[in-house]
Image (tube, grey):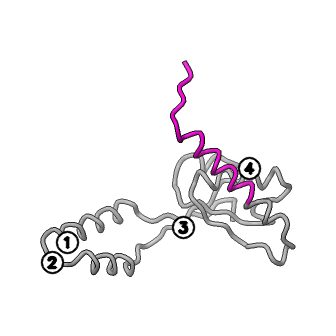
Amino acid sequence: KDIRIEGIDDYKRDVEEVAEFFVEKIASLSRENRPDLVICRGHIALHLLRILKKNGLRCPDDIALMSTSNFEANRFCSPALSLVVQDSREMGRYAGELLFRICEGKISREDAILEARQHIFPITITEREST
């Protein structure tokens, strides 16, 4: 039996529409005015990659593409997507630490927000065929 989960299909459609719109705008620009690189979440990157091809744009020749999500499909699409990833476990640990400090009264919520905005998490770059 086919089960429809409300919101999921609409979300996919919205991502598809945004990707189509974005690629149409890129395609309308002269080569000199196009961005060199687009960095986006994994599922969006996969949509963009497909729609770039559909519109005759080559990745990475016409525009390079990187994903911020490290999931298996990135390696197996063509071209394989390069990655720029932050350690989500470290981000979660840091957020939990801030939350405990707020609960213990060691830092105000406002100061925790300011501190979090200034904290820099290291990134890992995995170069593949899309850059």
SS at mark 3?
strand
Seen as rendered, the residue at the extreme left is 104
SS at mark 2?
loop
Task: Quote the CA–CA distance across marks 4 and 3.
Answer: 22 Å
Which residue carries the number 1 mark?
A: 102
User: Which-is-in-front pick, marks 4 and 1?
Assistant: 1
Which residue carries the number 3 mark?
A: 125
Highlighted range, magenta: 1-21
Give the residue displayed 84% in from the left and 54% down from the top.
Answer: 55
In the image shown, does 28 or 66 lie closer to the viewer?
Answer: 28
Query: Looking at numbered disc 4 in the image, what kind of residue is underneath it?
Result: Arg
Assign the N terminus to one quadrant of the image: top right
Label 1, residues with CA under 10 Å away: few <14, some 14-19, many ≥20:
some
Query: Looking at numbered disc 2 in the image, what kind of residue is underneath it?
Result: Lys
Which residue carries the number 2 mark?
A: 106
Residue 67, picture quadrant: bottom right
Residue 116, picture quadrant: bottom left
Task: Quote the CA–CA distance across marks 2 and 1.
Answer: 6 Å
Which residue carries the number 4 mark?
A: 50
User: Which-is-in-front pick, marks 4 and 3?
Assistant: 4
* Disc assigned to residue 34: none
Q: Earlier in the sequence, mark 2 or mark 3?
A: 2
Give the residue displayed 56% in from the left and 22% down from the top.
Answer: 2
